Structures are given as C-alpha cells and as structure tokens.
Image (cartoon, rainbow, N blue to C red):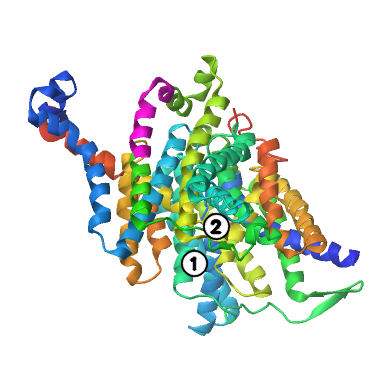
Amino acid sequence: MKQRRQERVDRGIKARSDDIFALTSYREMLYVSVPPVLPVIGLIILPLILPPYWQKVLISTCIFALLAMSWDFLVSVGMVSLGQALFFGVGAFVAGALDRFAGLPIWLTIPLGTVLGGALCTVALLPVLRLRGVYFSMVTLVLPLMLERCIEATGFFGGTEGLAGLKPFASKWIEMYFVAAVVLIALFGFRRLLTTDYGLVLKAIKDNDRSVMSAGINIYWLKAQALFVAGCVGAFCGAYMTHVYMFVGMPAFALDYSILPLASAVVGGMGTFAGSVMGAFILVPLSEALRGIGGLRTVIYALALVVFIVSLPEGIFHYIQRKYHQFERWVEVEK
Amino acid sequence: MLEVTLIYGFVNSIILALIALGFSLTFGISGVSNFAYGAFYVLAGYTVWILIHKLSIPFLPAVILSVLFTAALGFLLYRFVLLRIRGLVISEVIATFGVGLAILELFRHLGFTGFEYTLPVFSEGSIMIGNTYVDHQRLWIVGVGIALAIGLYLFTHHTRTGLAFRGIAQDEKTALSLGINSDRIAGISVAFGSGLAAVAAVLILPRGTISVNEGYDVLINALAVCIIGGLGSTVGVVVASFLIGYAQMLTDVLSGPHWKMIVSLVAILLILVVKPSGLFGKQKELEERI
C-alpha cells in the first residue's frame, strides 16, 4: 500500500542567501532585505495616508505592539507575565506625577517615566524572581489589580479622578513618528539582542535554568536585568500614552493592557518579536473596525487568544516564515 | 461591636470557603487550571435569573438546572479547550482565563448590569444570636458551606473517584498505571468544580445584585484561599478561608471597605514570596521555585 507524507525543503534561494553569496544577485538581495524593510516602510508611510481617526488607532496599535514585544522578551527569558498593565500603569503614573507635581517638560517626563518606571517594576518583582512558571504569572496578575485598588483607597495621584490636563505633544506628527520609531528600535533591537551571546544565556534560562546555574552564572541578576529592559519598554508605553491622553488615572492598570499584548504575541507567534508586532497590527485595527458593531473588544481578543492557543500555538508569523523559506511537497512512502 | 465582628467574620470566612471549594477541587486537588471559575460563578447566577424571570421556571428547579448547566459547560471547556493543551500549565492558565474573560465581557456587553438582577433568598427572616441579627440566608450559607467542606474532605479521601482526583495531581503516570483514566478524571474534576461554583453562586448572590465585576473578585478570592491553604489540601482551604475572612473583616471595620479586597491580594503576594507551596501544601514543593 502506497502512503504519502508531506516533506518540507528549504527553497534554493534560502540556501543561497544564507551566506555571503546573498550579494551575488539582486534577487537574493531582495529576498534577504524585503522582510525587514517592509515594517520600516509601512511605519513611515502609514501616518501620512491614514485619516485622523485611524492615526489614533495607529498610535494605540504601536503601543500594544511595544507591550507585546516586552511580554515576548520576558517569555524568552522564562518569565510569563499576566500583568503588562503593571509596567504600563507604573510608567503612566510616574510620568503623570512628574508632570503635575514637579512641572517637568515632556522631553524629561517620558525618559524619566521610562527608566524610573522600569526600575520600580523591577524592584517590585525582585522578591518573586525565584518563583517559576505559573507562580510568577499569578504574582504579575495580582500586582496591577492591587495597585489599582490602592490608588482607589488612598486617593494618591488623584485617586478615582486621576490627573487631568497634562502637557500634550507639540504636534501630532512628532507624536506619531516618535512612537513608530520606538517600535522599530525595539523590534530590531530585541531581535538583535537575543542572537548575541548575552541573549543566548537569557534564552538558556528559559530552557533549563538549573544548567545555567551550574555553569556558574547568577541567573537572578540576569533575570532582573531582563525584567528591567522589559519593564522600561512597558513603562515607556505608559509614559507616552499619559501625554497622548493628557490624563492618567486608574484605567492605566486596566486588564486590557495585560490581555491585549498577550493576545497579540500569541496570535502573531511567540519568540520572534516580529510576530508580536504583526499580531498587534492585526488585532487592534480589527477590533477597532468591529467597534461599530459593539464594544466587544475584549471578547474578541479573549476568543482569538483561546483559538490560537488551542489550534495554532505557533502563531501567524512562524507560519508565514515557513512558507517564505521552505516549500512543501507530498512524497510517496514505500511500505 | 466585637460580637458583630466575630459573627460576621465567621460568615465571611464560610463564604470564602464556599467560593474556594470548587476552585480548590479543580486547581488544587486535581491540578487542572480552571481560571474561568469566576465567570462560571457569575454565569450560574445569570442562568438562574434568566430561568426564573424569562422562562418563569420555579426557583428550585431553576437552581438545579443552573448547577447542571454550569457543570456541563465545565466539562465542555475541558473537552474542547483544556484537553488539547493538558500539561502546558501556562497555556492552560491563559486559555481558561481567556474563556472566562470572554464570558464575563460578553455579559457586560449584553447589558446585564443593574439592580433588577437579584436572586431570591432561600427563606426570609432572621434570628438573634446574642445581640446580633443574622438573616436566614447567611445561616443557609454557613450550613451548606460546612456540609460541603466536610463532604469534599470525605469525597477526596474515601471514594474511588475522589482518590483518583488526588492521584492524577500527585503523579499522573502512576495513576495511569493503576488504571485511572486521567483524561476522564480531569474532565469530571473540572465539571464538579464548575458545579460547585454554581452552588456557591446560588447561595451567595442573593445577598446583593449580580454584577460582572464579581467574577474577577471571586477568582482572586478563590485563588488567594487556594494558594494560602496550599494546593491539594482541604484543611488548608478551611484554615486559609478563616485567616482571610477575619483579616478582611478586621480591615473593613478598622479602615473602611475600600481596603477589603486588598487583603487577599496582599495575602497572595506574601505567601508566594515566603512559602509558595502554601501553609498545608505538600505537592511539588521543589518545583515551584529555584
């Protein structure tokens, strides 16, 4: 009886352009350069052609792409966060407080919010760095909820009212291109970082933390560094959005900021960062387009998350990447 | 004043135990995550409301139908979502949390908020304990809560199914070699846990209106009780309920109701930092931290 199986083979052009021979013809050069250049061109052109409402959508898409990359980076180091809202909220409140109480200009509040926010989150999570897997996730799930209630109960930072009337950006072009540039820097920076020796050690912590320890490497120090980097990216989103909305309040700790980045990264494909960006650029505009039907935003995200986790855990990006690099064919198997 | 605090603290603790029992049965005792628990709790409440007010079914059949419906839903959740990702703990958590989120936000979207969404009490009236009025519904809660806690202990220690529940959490391969079908048992466990969520909802919800946000609070409270008591321990659930119950009551009395919810969140943080396996937990003490 003849049976068939599917075989995957690298395309010839993939094999040729893996090496210095990529420089031998335009076709190979295009094959290598088109995928990374696409997002750059997209993010430069999109703000110019979109109508004003969709420019706002682009901003929140970029923010969710950044949060998703920050989540993806933490996952690559073996820390699964269920509370990106913590990073976002802390960054937002630091920037808001610096603006309101210290009167700092916007080009100081955002960098300070980013670094201080990242540092505060790292310090807050230091005691639980020793926890692994689902226990770490639970702590990150609980912390933003707790901070939200604390602000509600104590009335610090404006309590339930929040802080309104913060300084806006000078123009909407600066606003859009600033966040687009940060998305690109984060995307290529993170991808580069994980291929360095340092990144290899970080990934090894996820794969087998004990063998990294037995190699004489202090994994808690490395985990804290990774947490700081991811926290800074998340806190930047918060600090930036504070000035876009000109307002900061309890919604900064909302569940949306935890669940949407997670959904983007899972739908797009984990571990590649490009997948996270792709996921955000699919899900956020999609839910925005469906907003006319009703406020089903969170429901759609949650369902997309479940469907992808159960049926396509590799994500869209890995799927496309495979099609780009390899072809598939059916071959006969003798029995 | 002290007397009121003591009595209502007791009732509060039993409510927490009742909320946590179902979650503990699924997550703690058989090691299957069901983070859609809070959503099932709220769903059961709305189901009873719909059955009574839209389909005019009498109270008692409505309650029974709702419990059976929620249990069936739990089994479906296991069969179509959890079964495919068994063993990938993080995926289990994210997927079930996603299902719960979808249910809760769907209710919010459909406009199920307001004062008309209340469930009837089991019986009207109240009794005096010392100088404190306690209404009948709270007595029902205490009675059923204690009975269920004892029942759960006996069930997980003296029946074949109950022992199998604990077996698959302790060592799935050994359980398999002893003829326990771990997939089937895990499914039953999720169904039982969801059913218990419905029982808790029917008992507790008549005290106020049904609201979507309660789903999140219930999940956090159940999680807090389970983690503090230690996974896999029925005694732990009871002790942790009393710890958190009285702590919540004290913060409520001393510093206002805003702080009440923070108690369980702080408790989760503290216990995870100090002793992640919980007060009475024995399983996997080496695996959760490095």
Q: Evaluate whether label 2 is on the same chain as label 1.
A: yes
Where are the magenta residues, as a range? A185-200
Q: Quadrant of residue A269?
A: top left
Q: Amino acid at mark 2?
A: Tyr
C-alpha gap between disc 2 and disc 1: 14 Å
**x, y percent for residue B228:** 69, 45
Residue beneath the point at 31% across and 40% down: A274
Viewer-proximal residue among A118 and B214: A118
Q: Residue furthest right?
A: B130
Q: Is residue B270 above or below residue B220?
A: above
Residue beneath disc 1: B69
Q: Is residue B42 left or right of B127 when viewed as pictured?
A: left
Helix, strand, or loop for circle 1?
A: helix
Please tell me whether mark 2 or mark 1 is closer to you in this view: 2
Residue beneath the point at 8% across and 30% down: A26
Residue beneath disc 2: B37
Q: Residues within 10 Å of mark 2 (few under 14, many from 20)?
A: many
